[in-house]
Image: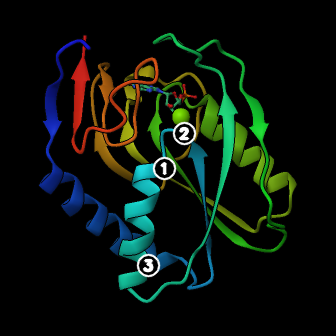
Amino acid sequence: MAPVRKLFDEDAVARRVGELSAEIATTYPPNMIMIGILTGAFVFMADLMRALDRLGLSPGVEFIRLGSYGHSKESAGEVRLLSDLHTDVDGRAVLLVDDICDTGRSLAFAQDLLRSRGAVKVGTCVLVDKPSRRIVDVEIDFIGFTVPDVFVVGYGIDYADQYRHLPYIGTVD
Ligand code: IMP
Ligand code: MG
């Protein structure tokens, strides 16, 4: 494994997740549904849902799996739905949760999908935003950290299926 340079340590991530949950709780109903994008979002989702619980929300928790990246650092460009929801989101307030917004293709694809299924509100929340990489214009309602064009790993985020286990967020060259 290539060396990892630490960007945000465990305390910084925990603090930011707490702040995000407080923002989310002011704009979302208690019965909202959080939809995470696998695989990268699973650690963030686990912490975020428990932070929301502490604020009195009872969010539904669901995941979809999207494909595009494979084992490279560059997106293949086309997003596909690899694993679908098991819940009817018609009429529901939904919060899409992803690890990173890079080109914006994944979030835009997921947002279109959920709107087509009748979700009434489809907000977006990402742990890490890389705005300089954006290709598709997508609005992000809640952002954990904004970073320049670096490759990020840890806290669920991988490079070639490695580094997900790290409890902090770092970068590899
Ligand atoms: P987008 O569709 O280009 O916005 O890419 C979103 C997905 O690409 C994220 O959900 C990540 O899984 C992956 N990705 C983008 N940038 C990085 C990175 O720096 N490290 C690891 N995965 C990344
Ligand atoms: Mg992802």
Q: Is mark 2 within 8 Å of ligand 2?
A: yes
Badges 2 and 3: C-beta atoms under 8 Å apart?
A: no
In the rendered structure, the answer to whether residue 86 lies left or right of residue 171 reads right
Q: Position of residue 63 (x, y in %)?
A: 65, 53
Quickly name the residue at label 2: 39
- At 85% from the left and 69% from the top, the residue drawn is 90
Q: Position of residue 131 (x, y in %)?
A: 40, 30
- At 61% from the left and 40% from the top, the residue drawn is 107
Judged from the image, the secondary structure of the residue bearing numbered disc 3 is helix
For label 3, the crowd category at 10 Å Cα-Cα, with few meaning under 14, some 14 to 19 and many 20 or more, is some
Quickly name the residue at label 1: 42
In the rendered structure, the answer to whether residue 35 lies left or right of residue 151 reads right
Quickly name the residue at label 3: 25
Disc with the residue nearer the chain's start (3 vs 1): 3
Badges 2 and 1: C-beta atoms under 8 Å apart?
A: yes
- At 43% from the left and 81% from the top, the residue drawn is 53
Quadrant in which the C terminus appears: top left
Q: Position of residue 11 (x, y in %)?
A: 13, 56
